[in-house]
Structures are given as C-alpha cells and as structure tokens.
Amino acid sequence: MASGSTPNGTPQPPAKICVYCGSSPGKNPAYLKAAQELGRLMAENNIKLVYGGGTVGLMGEVAKTIVSISGPDAVHGIIPEALVKWERDATYSTMKDANGYHVPEEQIYGRTTVVKDMHTRKLMMAREVIEGGPGSGFIALPGGYGTMEELLETATWNQLGIHDKGVCLLNVNGFYNGLTEWIKTAVDEGFVKAGNADILVTADDAAGALKSLREYKVSDARYGLDWGNE
C-alpha cells in the first residue's frame, strides 16, 4: 500500500496502526501466529507500527516481525518508565537512549521512546495514528486488562468525536466473543446507541483487520463535540 499523494500533490503520510495486545504470548499458539501474520502483512503493505514498546509476548512479536521485513524506522514503541522492567527481554540491558533510559536494540524492535506515565504513552500513540494516512487505525490482538482499557478508551474517543479512525478487534480463536456480546447487550438495554455498535469492528484474521481499517465507516451517531486541539 503506497503512501501516494494528496489531491494537491503533496506527499500523503504513510498509514500507521497502533496495535494493542498482551505482553504475554498466551496459552494458545494461535495468538502468537496471529501476531506474526499481522506484522508480516503490515510490513508488506508499508504500514508503520505504533505500539506499547514491550519486547515480550504478542507486542514484541508484532514489532520484531515488522522490523525484520521493513527495518527499524517502521516501528515506534512508546513505554512508561515504570513498565520498562516488566515488559522487556534481555535486549533492554545494554542500550540507553539520550536521556539515560534503557531501551531495546533498535535493529530488532525499532525506535523506542520512554515516557513518564501511561496517559502520555496513550496520547502519543493515538496522535501518531490520527496523523497517519488512509488505512490508519487501531487493532487489538488478545491481551489482558491493559489491552482492554486501551481498546475501550480508544473506542470511547471515537464515539466522542476526538478521532475518526477505525478500531478493530482481531478476534483470534473467538477471544473477543464475550466483548462483542456485551456490546449487543449494551445496545439492547439502551446504554449504547445502535449506530455506535460498529465503532468496534471485528475481523477473524490479519488480512481482514487491515481491510476493515481501510474500509472503515464513521458512525453517524457519534457525538458532535468540539475538542479543539485535544
């Protein structure tokens, strides 16, 4: 997927996808395989990755897969200082950035930025995606509480009109079936507008997830709020 040009001839920014996922590989090998496949297809389509900066579990697998094909400039990991010692492997032990923070080997995991807190991490990841070209958006692979929190906050920001990028559940092995059922219940019980049920779209494989972001339709039921420079 080439970046191309805008109608006025200026270069179009590349697509950027933020991937939310676990720092664990999970028990089912299908999860790791899905992470590798997503990374491969993103690289083959010249899509850049923004992610949580860890080098272990599914997040590390997506990052190093893309770097192995497209090089380190295709990946930007953003991690809070407090999480560095948890979401890392041995590559964090020797390299330091300009501020003295330990960071992973760039030639394996791409560029890493260490920030002070979770809010800064999430804001920076979202801004990169929002400024990306067509096909940019957010994809959630399986994960735990952190993945779910980031995913639902991003969906809420879409509903509130803070951004208009697609948010896709990569529903590996039915992992997100419970969440999709909850959305249906929330609509039925009047807590989510029916038109906003598809703010979160689903795909069964990596190819479908990328396609869903390219073809994403913004809900007409979103709140028309003015957030200024939020």
Image (tube, helix red, strand yellow):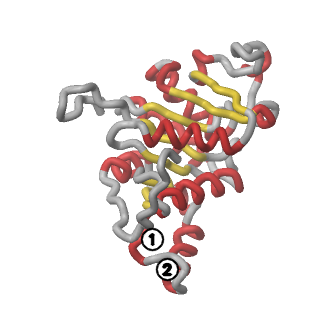
| Residue farthest bottom in this picture | 189
Residue 71 placement (x, y as % from top left): 48, 18
The residue that appears at 44% across and 67% down in the rendered structure is: 223
Give the alpha-carbon distance from disc 1 to disc 2, as whole Å: 7 Å
Residue 45 placement (x, y as % from top left): 35, 33
The picture quadrant where one finds residue 174 is: bottom right
The picture quadrant where one finds residue 25 is: top right
Residue 176 placement (x, y as % from top left): 56, 63
Q: Is disc 2 placed on a helix, strand or loop?
A: helix
In this rendering, the answer to whether 204 lies above or below 210 is below
In this rendering, the answer to whether 128 lies above or below 170 is above
Q: Dot 1: few (<14), some (14–19), or many (≥20) neighbours within 10 Å?
A: some
Residue 221 placement (x, y as % from top left): 39, 71
The picture quadrant where one finds residue 15 is: top left
- Asked whether, in this view, residue 90 is left or right of residue 188, the answer is right
The residue that appears at 54% across and 54% down in the rendered structure is: 154
Question: Pointer 2: what residue?
Answer: 187
Q: Dot 2: few (<14), some (14–19), or many (≥20) neighbours within 10 Å?
A: some
- Dot 1 and dot 2 residues touching (CB under 8 Å): yes
Q: Which quadrant, please, contains the N terminus? A: top left
In this rendering, the answer to whether 205 lies above or below 69 is below
In depth, the one of 5 and 160 nearer the eye is: 160
In depth, the one of 94 and 79 nearer the eye is: 79
- Asked whether, in this view, residue 79 is left or right of residue 18, the answer is right
The residue that appears at 45% across and 31% down in the rendered structure is: 48
Question: Pointer 1: what residue?
Answer: 197
Q: Is disc 1 placed on a helix, strand or loop?
A: helix
Q: Amino acid at mark 1?
A: Ala
Which comes before the other along the chain, label 1 or label 2?
2
The residue that appears at 59% across and 42% down in the rendered structure is: 123
Q: Amino acid at mark 2?
A: Val
In depth, the one of 160 and 195 nearer the eye is: 160
